[in-house]
Each structure stands twice: as structure tokens, then as C-alpha cells.
Image (cartoon, rainbow, N blue to C red):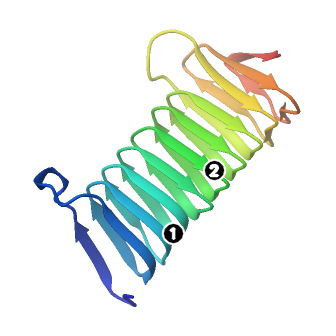
């Protein structure tokens, strides 16, 4: 257990040392280089991951920066910035998700999502969604049993929102259409 110190772990994955595993720790700041599995960890400040990250029951007091793929379950953070495939299950993001690439939310709560890529949300509660251009053509987001309290905005692109089950958008859809299936 490391308390009140900056923890820096370097994973020399390409040299055969494998995936870093961190369990039951409380840290001020966490920087992970390489594939990482983080379980039952609380971090007061930021977490930076350069590589694939799997998080379970992790608390991040400020921002989680992911430069690679992310899979997180039962975790809470102030803010998330991800540059890869992002899958969140039963997570709470108090402020904003900024993502580039495919993002999937299941039973999550967040304020704003700003995304360059595709989005699927199921059983989630979102404040608003901003979709930015990431490829030519139409951008589609899929919402199943998800509530968006505010607007869904497609910025300088043609977009479509597909609503399934009890999905609702309480605000407006700007720059796109809505289809219920």
C-alpha cells in the first residue's frame, strides 16, 4: 500500500514483463505505461495510462487520461479523456467524457459527452451529447433505455440518433434526425 506519494509504474510489456496489476491502493497520482489492470484503487488526482487499461472499482478524483483502449467497471471519475476504444459499465463521470473512437456506455451516469466516433449507450443517464466529425458520411448514435436530459448536437456533420426501448431525449437534436425502432 502506497499512501500520499506519486506512484509511477513503467511496464516493459514488449520486453516480456507482462501486464501491470495494481490492487487495493490509495494514491495521489497514478501514471501507467503499458497494459494495466487496476482493481479497487483510489486516486485523489489524475490517472494517466499509456496503453490498454482495465479498471474495476476505481475512483479518480480528477481526470482519467487514456492513450489506448479502456474497459472500466463500477468506477467513478471527475472527467474522462480517451483516445481509443472505450467501454464503460456501471460508471459515473461527474463532468465530461471526451472520446475519440468507439464508445459504449452501459448503466452509466455522466454530464456531457464530446465524441469523435460512434456511441452506444444502454440504461444510462446523460446530460448532453456533442458528436464531432471523425469520418466522412453520416454519424449514427444508438441509445437504448437511455435518457439524455439536454441536447444531442451533431457539429458540422449529418447525424442520426436511433432510440430503442425507453430511450428519450428531453432536449433537441441539432444537425441530425431521430429514429425510433
Left or right of 109, for residue 17: left
Q: Residue at x 40, y 39 (%)?
A: 84
Q: Residue 64's spot in the image, x, y percent?
A: 45, 59
Disc nearer the start of the sequence (1/2): 1
Q: Is residue 155 above or below residue 83?
A: above
- Is mark 1 in CB contact (under 8 Å) with mark 2? no
Q: Looking at the image, which residue is at 40% across and 55% down?
A: 65
What is the quadrant of residue 113 in the picture? top right
Q: Secondary structure at mark 1?
A: strand
Residue 61 x %, y %: 53, 72
Query: Residue 6: where, in percent of width, then height?
Result: 31, 81
As drawn, which residue projects farthest toward the right? 166
Q: Which mark is residue 89?
A: 2
Please tell me which residue lies in front, 122 or 137: 122
Q: Quarter of the image holding residue 74?
A: bottom right
Please tell me the numbered disc located at residue 148: none
Callout 1 crowding tier (Cα within 10 Å): few <14, some 14–19, many ≥20? many
Q: Quickly name the residue at label 1.
A: 60
Q: Quadrant of the N terminus?
A: bottom left
Q: Would you place residue 49 above or below residue 174 in this image?
A: below
Is residue 77 positioned above or below 177 on the image? below
- Compared across the picture, whether 135 is left or right of 35 comes to right
At 61% across and 34% down in the image, what residue appears? 130
Amino acid at each position: 500500500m502506497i499512501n500520499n506519494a506519486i506512484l509511477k509504474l513503467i511496464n516493459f510489456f514488449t520486453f516480456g514483463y507482462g501486464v501491470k496489476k495494481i490492487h487495493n491502493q490509495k494514491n495521489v497520482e497514478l501514471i501507467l505505461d503499458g497494459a494495466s489492470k487496476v482493481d479497487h484503487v483510489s486516486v485523489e488526482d489524475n490517472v494517466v495510462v499509456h496503453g490498454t487499461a482495465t479498471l474495476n472499482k476505481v475512483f479518480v478524483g480528477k481526470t482519467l487520461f487514456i492513450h489506448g483502449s479502456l474497459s472500466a467497471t463500477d468506477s467513478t471519475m471527475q472527467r474522462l479523456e480517451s483516445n481509443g476504444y472505450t467501454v464503460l459499465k456501471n460508471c459515473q463521470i461527474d463532468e465530461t467524457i471526451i472520446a475519440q473512437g468507439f464508445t459504449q456506455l452501459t448503466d452509466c451516469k455522466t454530464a456531457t459527452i464530446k465524441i469523435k466516433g460512434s456511441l452506444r449507450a444502454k440504461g444510462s443517464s446523460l446530460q448532453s451529447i456533442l458528436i464531432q466529425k471523425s469520418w466522412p458520411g453520416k454519424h449514427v448514435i444508438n441509445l437504448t433505455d437511455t435518457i439524455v436530459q439536454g441536447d444531442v448536437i451533431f457539429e458540422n456533420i449529418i447525424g442520426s440518433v436511433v432510440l430503442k426501448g425507453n430511450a428519450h431525449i428531453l432536449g433537441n437534436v441539432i444537425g441530425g434526425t431521430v429514429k425510433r425502432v
